[in-house]
Each structure stands twice: as structure tokens, then as C-alpha cells.
Amino acid sequence: MNEVLSYSSPSGSSNGYSSGGGGSSSSTRPRWSRAGSSVIYTPAEVRTHTPARENVERRASVPDLRDVFLCHAWDDRKDAAKELHDQLEMNGVSVWFSEKDVLLGATLLREIDEGLAKSRVGIVLVTPALLKRLAGEGIADKELSALLARDLLVPIVHNTTYEDLREVSPLLGSRSGLSTAEDSMANIASKLAELVTI
């Protein structure tokens, strides 16, 4: 097991969170990274994703949990959300995804609530469409509230910025996550796979 012994403080941040997804340009290996893994993490990513990893480890013995719950805007279900879902599944991650897990005729909110309860970690795909939905307090807002209540949340910023996110949701914007401006969707999926794999 590889332990991270020290962290560099992300520049421009006084609250321990990076202003974006990456923070520092140096790299480190988190304790959950598999031996021989080529996935690179910044110290800020390791520091801010450690609580989510600890939750994964605490819930490892709970039967029938999905690895991740994918929170996304309805408008992204066939594009960015589907791409992230597919990349995660290619990495062996079990994903709760509304497009495949909400059956025809089922009550959407009830299915989402059950999906949240039966997932180890929540990932929020933050896109311009999600920002618009959050401002309107739709279903994504309810999912997000449930995820924010626990240390289960990793935001993935795609085609927008953390600054835009903080304008709509300061609480979510205070969480450091990953960004497709800094990493490919495939590399983000690899990082998430390592984070949630026991």
C-alpha cells in the first residue's frame, strides 16, 4: 500500500480545496491506487478524494451497492453522461444511471432515492445544462442535496468552469473534483475506478 506522506497546499486556496479540479501540477500516488497503475493524481486530488475513498472502504461489506451514482442533467443523458457512464463501466465500475436503472412507469424520484441509498459514492457531472437545472431547483438539485449531506460526492466539471459552478452552487463549488479541461473523460473514469474499487 502506498501512503502519501505530504501534500502541497493548492495555490490561491485558503479552505483546503483547489479552485478547480487539479490544484498543483506535481503528482502523487494515493494509497488506493493499484500497483502498477499509470493513473496520475495531483496532491489536491488525493487530499480531497480521500473522504470519498474512506466512505467506499466503510461501505465495502454492505451487499448490493453500486460503486457510483451518476447525477447529471436530463439534457446530458445521451451525450456527456452516457460517455462517462460507458467509460466507467469499461473500467469495471458498477454505475447507477437513470437511463438504464429507471424502469418505464416507475416513479422517478423513488428510483433516484433508492439509487442514492444503494451507491457507495456519488459523482455529479457538472455541465452548462446541470447549472441551468440547479438554478431551477429540479430533480438534479434534490439528488445533489442528498449527496452533499454525506462525504459521497465527487464533482466532474465538463464544458464549464468551477467559477460558473460557484455562482450557482457555492456548496458544490467548494468541493474539489475533476475537470475535463484538465483530463480526458477516459482518464477521469480511470481515476474514479481506482477511487471506488476495493
Image (spheres, grey):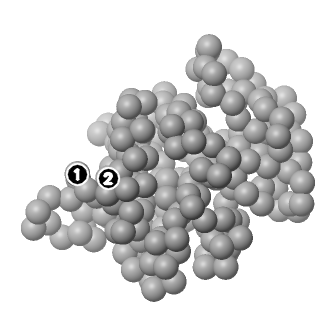
Q: Which residue is mark 2?
A: 97
Q: Residue furthest left?
A: 105
Q: Regarding mark 1 in the picture, which secondary structure is present there?
A: helix
What x and y, as percent, mark residue 160? 60, 65
The answer to whether the residues at label 1 and label 2 have Cβ atoms under 8 Å apart is yes
Asked if residue 150 shows in the view, the reply is no
Identify which residue is drawn at 42% across, 38% down: 87
What amino acid is labelled 2 in the image? Phe
Quote the CA–CA distance across marks 1 and 2: 6 Å
What x and y, as percent, mark residue 15? 83, 62
Q: Label for residue 137? A: none
Residue 110 horizontal side relative to residue 29, left or right: left
Q: Quadrant of residue 107?
A: bottom left
From what the image shows, is residue 83 above or below residue 159?
Answer: above
Residue 67 horizontal side relative to residue 147, left or right: left
| Circle 1 crowding by C-alpha within 10 Å: few under 14, some 14–19, many from 20 | few
Q: Regarding mark 2 in the picture, which secondary structure is present there?
A: loop
Q: Residue furthest top?
A: 36
What x and y, as percent, mark residue 169? 61, 76
| Circle 2 crowding by C-alpha within 10 Å: few under 14, some 14–19, many from 20 | some
Q: Nearer the viewer, residue 65 or 72?
A: 72
- Where is the N terminus found, in terms of image quarters? top right
Q: Label for residue 100? A: 1
From what the image shows, is residue 155 above or below residue 84?
Answer: below
What x and y, as percent, mark residue 77? 33, 60
What amino acid is labelled 1 in the image? Lys
Number of marks in picture: 2
Identify which residue is drawn at 86% across, 51% down: 10
